[in-house]
Amino acid sequence: MSKVADSIRRGLEEAVAYARGEADANAYRVHVPADIDVKAIRARLGMTQEEFAGRFGFSVNTLRHWEQGVRQPEGPARAYLLVIDRAPKAVQKALHAA
C-alpha cells in the first residue's frame, strides 16, 4: 500500500474511532458536521447515485434515503462523506489500492 493510501486509511480509522467515542477526545481536534448535504457532494463530483454509491461503497438505497432526508448519515458516515467531499481523488485512490 502506498504511503498516501496508508495515511488516508489510518485517518479514516481514527475518524471512525472518534465518532464512536472510542478515542481520547482530548487528543483530537476534529469537527464532524451534524448535517451534511450528500446530494451536493455527489453533484459536485458529477456522479449519478449509482456511480457515487459504487465508487465509495454505499448502497444505492442508503444514498437515496440520505438525499431524500428519510435518514441522516451517522457520525462515521458523516466523517467519511466529509473526506470524500474534500479529497475525493485520494479516497478513490485509497479504495482502489485496497
Image: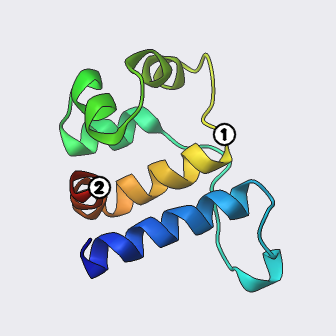
Residue at 37% from the left image edge and 53% from the top image edge: 84
Residue type at the position of mark 1: Glu
Circle 1 Cα neighbour tier, 10 Å, few/some/many (<14 / 14–19 / ≥20): few
Residue at 81% from the left image edge and 83% from the top image edge: 26
Picture layout, residue 57 above or below residue 60 = below
Residue at 70% from the left image edge and 80% from the top image edge: 28
Residue 26 relative to residue 49: left or right:
right
Picture layout, residue 26 above or below residue 46 = below
Relative depth, front residue between 17 and 77? 17
Disc 2 to disc 1, C-alpha distance = 24 Å
Residue 52 relative to residue 64: left or right:
left
**Snapshot quadrant of residue 91:** bottom left
Q: How many marks?
A: 2
In the rendered image, the quadrant that contains the C terminus is bottom left
Residue 39 relative to residue 47: left or right:
right
Q: Secondary structure at mark 2?
A: loop
Relative depth, front residue between 29 and 94? 94
Residue at label 1?
Answer: 74
Q: Pick out the residue farthest to the bottom.
A: 27
Marked residue nearer the N-terminal end (2 or 1): 1
Circle 2 Cα neighbour tier, 10 Å, few/some/many (<14 / 14–19 / ≥20): few
Residue at label 2?
Answer: 98
Residue 29 percent coordinates (x, y): 68, 79
How is this picture coloured? rainbow
Residue 90 percent coordinates (x, y): 26, 64
- Return the mark for residue 90: none
Residue 1 percent coordinates (x, y): 26, 71
- Mark in front: 2 vs 1: 2
Residue 65 relative to residue 94: left or right:
right
Residue type at the position of mark 2: Ala
Q: Are marks 2 and 1 in contact (CB under 8 Å)?
A: no
